[in-house]
Amino acid sequence: MTMNSESSIGDADDDKRTIGPSASNKDVLELLVQQGHYKTALGAFQAAAMLALRKGMDVSTAPPSAGTMWNRGSVSSQVLEFLTWYLPTRVPARALEQLGNLGTAYIAEKVKTGGYSVTEIFELSRMDFD
């Protein structure tokens, strides 16, 4: 997976300090929170980034951010550490923004077609805990 940045060189100070969803993705994130799938839009965005990774989506097609919504410090440090290790990258916040926007756009497309469930979008198997 290739990032839209100098992901293997540079300094962590080169990473973004704030990130945000694309304009069209904001509504989908809010919908996911309103429907009770996530507690926060940031949580939904982080999950969408992991979906993009899982599906091997091409980050060069990610919609651009429409500004800032979250500070890098509000993002789960575990998510940033995972991206740093997995990709690998020295700019995990930038990677999260690209992946989050790509994954959210994928979810948005599923929402537009209707009849979706988060379980189906993430291709999760049903688990019974009885």
Image (tube, rainbow, N blue to C red):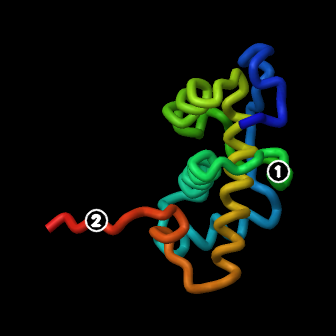
Residue drawn at x 51%, y 62% as measured from the top left: 122
Residue 25 placement: quadrant: bottom right
| Viewer-side residue, 12 vs 6 | 6
Q: From the viewer's perspective, is 129 left or right of 71?
A: left
Q: Amino acid at mark 1?
A: Ser
Decide if residue 18 is on the left or right side of residue 125. right
Residue found 75% across the figure and 45% down from its top: 98
Secondary structure at numbered mark 1: loop
Give the percent coordinates (x, y) of residue 46.
58, 48
Q: Amino acid at mark 2?
A: Met
Q: Nearer the viewer, residue 68 or 119?
A: 119
**Local SS, label 2:** loop
Confirm whether residue 42 shows in the render: no
- Residue designated by label 1: 65
Disc 1 to disc 2, C-alpha distance: 35 Å
The picture places residue 125, in percent across and down from the top left corner, at: 37, 64
At 19% from the left and 64% from the top, the residue drawn is 129
The residue under label 2 is 127
The quadrant of the picture occupied by the C terminus is bottom left
Question: In the picture, which quadrant includes the N terminus?
Answer: top right
**Residue 51 locus on image (x, y percent):** 58, 53
Q: Earlier in the sequence, mark 1 or mark 2?
A: 1
Which residue is depicted at the point 49% across and 33% down?
78
Task: Tell me which corner region of the image, top left, top right, bottom left or bottom right, holds residue 10.
Answer: top right
Question: Neighbour class for label 1 at 10 Å: few (<14), some, many (≥20)?
Answer: some
